[in-house]
Image: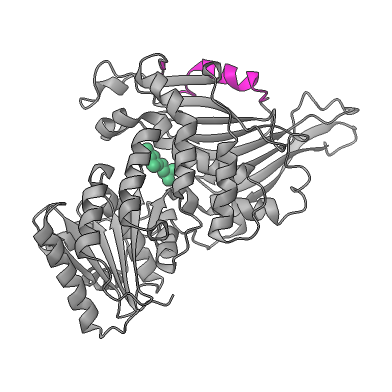
């Protein structure tokens, strides 16, 4: 990684997201040698009035090794990393504090004797979107990279980008007035997951899939996200958004794009994103009868959730893509909190074999499953002869479980990759403005019907599969449960 003089500025440095995701990801990059050049410096900015050391102490506890592992034992690395961090406190509209922040960054740049063109400033907004416009204005006015010949200033923002089409467009315009699209990195952390990144390779580098990946061969596709815990202290935030804004509009739609898109002209970010936008624009309006909403019992017991909340914590929605490849193939999107398991997977179910001489229809169909988490894996369910004297068949599987196949390989956290991409200036795994707009266009009418109380969530028991009505919708859409795996 070639960095000149790189300053990473985390705004909202004392908040949850920064502590749990941003700083640990930066630390993991550091440990792998990416941020170790003497030109790299990290700045934290937030309202809390604390010293550098107090911020470092707060972060230290979160620097764990890998996903949820034991606290990191390389304490020397931890200490060296923490020494890179300086802190400036101030409110998000305080001109003098942003001037001070700029002074601190410049001091660091000057001390490194930077050459023109090597000043790089990465602003990571680990903040609620409400303050994005104000903070971006401050950055624009006081903290831009001063060396215009080849250096850069980039802004990373986190969802939620708005609450519906109108508010998202407003936010996009506000940020677009301040920064060029090439400077804005809208994170959807699902795009940083290993098996999500694998989708393009799988689809376009394997002869197996090319001729089969269409309406002639595929019966239905499911994209599923389940969590086995509820809103856990985030009730206040969640209730304003609900599962459709929290998971469908971003994570599930991004996965859908990669599953459904046409082959891009090349791997250039613009070519890939052009194809994704086309998929989103081809999605037909959602029909109310192809939606099931749920809310787990006990959700409203959270003191931060209003007693009358109509917010769904679960949904199953059928999307239909009106193009040559996918007409007639339902894409069943399903996500929920407080369900019976934690899992995210894509299930591609193929049509029955015509002329079923083995009578294997009863056993189930060919299915290709990509498990994004936990335990990354992909497997293909296929019918084979049951070993033995009889000529009978059984549904078995070809299984590629990453834990077994790639033993000892650490799969990087989504945030690590995405921050690295930002430093490298690669926008492939970030959401472009027109993509965001097209995604909101799909869900906004449904969201307004929910917000108006026209559609109501059905109750379901925490720890269950969600409302049974969702399973009914699933089978109506053509999904057939297979046995075996
Ligand atoms: C976030 C949502 O974007 O994704 C959370 O706001 C959700 O509600 C989380 O829990 C899930 O991420 P992951 O990586 O654990 O699947």
x 10%, y 63%: residue? 51
Q: Quadrant of residue 436?
A: top left
Ligand 1 - quadrant of the structure image: top left
**Segment colored magenta:** 457-479
Q: Name the quadrant of the N terminus.
A: bottom left
x 63%, y 37%: residue? 347
Residue 330 within the magenta-colored segment of the rendering: no
How far across and how far down the image is residue 12, in percent? 22, 53
Q: Is residue 312 visible?
A: yes
x 60%, y 33%: residue? 222
Q: Name the quadrant of the C terminus.
A: top right
How far across and how far down the image is residue 442, in percent? 50, 32
Depth check: give the residue in front, 211 or 61. Answer: 211
Residue 463 within the magenta-colored segment of the rendering: yes
How far across and how far down the image is residue 404, in percent? 60, 55
Depth check: give the residue in front, 470 or 151. Answer: 151
Q: Is residue 476 above or below residue 53?
A: above
Q: Is residue 215 above or below residue 27?
A: above
Q: Is residue 63 visible?
A: no
Q: Is residue 308 above or below residue 94?
A: above
Residue 456 is left or right of residue 20, and the answer is right
How far across and how far down the image is residue 142, in percent? 19, 64
């Amino acid at each position: 990684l070639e960095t000149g003089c790189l300053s990473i500025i985390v705004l909202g440095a004392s908040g949850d997201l920064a502590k749990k995701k941003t700083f640990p990801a930066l630390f993991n990059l550091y440990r792998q040698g990416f941020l170790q050049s003497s030109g790299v410096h990290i700045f934290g900015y937030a309202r809390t009035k604390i010293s550098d050391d107090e911020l470092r102490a707060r972060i230290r506890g979160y620097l764990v090794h890998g996903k949820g592992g034991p606290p990191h034992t390389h304490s020397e690395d931890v200490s060296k990393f923490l020494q890179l961090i300086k802190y400036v406190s101030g409110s998000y509209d305080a001109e003098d504090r942003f001037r001070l922040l700029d002074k601190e960054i410049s001091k660091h740049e000057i001390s490194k004797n930077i050459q023109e063109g090597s000043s790089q400033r990465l602003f990571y907004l680990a903040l609620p979107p409400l303050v994005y416009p104000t903070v971006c204005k401050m950055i624009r006015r006081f903290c831009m990279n001063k060396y215009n010949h080849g250096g850069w200033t980039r802004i990373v923002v986190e969802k939620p980008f708005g609450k519906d089409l109108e508010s998202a467009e407003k936010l996009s315009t506000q940020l677009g007035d301040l920064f060029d699209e090439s400077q804005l990195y809208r994170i959807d952390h699902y795009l940083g997951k290993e098996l999500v990144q694998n989708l393009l390779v799988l689809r376009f580098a394997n002869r197996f899939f090319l001729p089969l990946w269409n309406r002639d061969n595929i019966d239905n596709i499911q994209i599923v996200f389940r969590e086995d815990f509820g809103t856990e202290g985030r009730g206040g935030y969640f209730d304003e958004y609900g599962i459709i804004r929290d998971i469908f509009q971003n994570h599930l739609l991004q996965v859908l794009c990669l599953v459904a898109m046409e082959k891009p002209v090349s791997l250039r970010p613009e070519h890939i994103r052009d194809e994704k936008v086309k998929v989103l624009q081809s999605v037909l309006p959602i029909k109310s009868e192809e939606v099931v909403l749920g809310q787990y019992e006990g959700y409203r017991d959270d003191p931060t959730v209003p007693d009358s909340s109509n917010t769904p914590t679960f949904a199953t929605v059928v999307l239909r893509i009106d193009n040559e490849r996918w007409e007639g193939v339902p894409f069943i999107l399903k996500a929920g909190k407080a369900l019976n398991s934690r899992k995210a997977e894509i299930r591609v179910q193929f049509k029955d074999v015509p002329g079923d001489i083995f009578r294997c229809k009863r056993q189930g169909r060919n299915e290709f499953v990509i498990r994004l988490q936990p335990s990354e894996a992909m497997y293909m369910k296929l019918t084979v002869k049951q070993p033995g004297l009889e000529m009978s068949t059984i549904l078995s599987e070809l299984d590629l479980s990453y834990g077994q196949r790639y033993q000892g390989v650490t799969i990087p956290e989504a945030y690590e990759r995405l921050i690295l991409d930002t430093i490298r200036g690669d926008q492939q795994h970030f959401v472009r403005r027109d993509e965001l707009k097209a995604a909101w266009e799909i869900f906004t009418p449904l969201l307004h019907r929910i917000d108006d109380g026209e559609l109501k969530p059905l109750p379901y028991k925490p720890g269950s599969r969600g409302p049974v009505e969702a399973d009914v919708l699933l089978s109506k859409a053509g999904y057939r449960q297979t046995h075996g795996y």
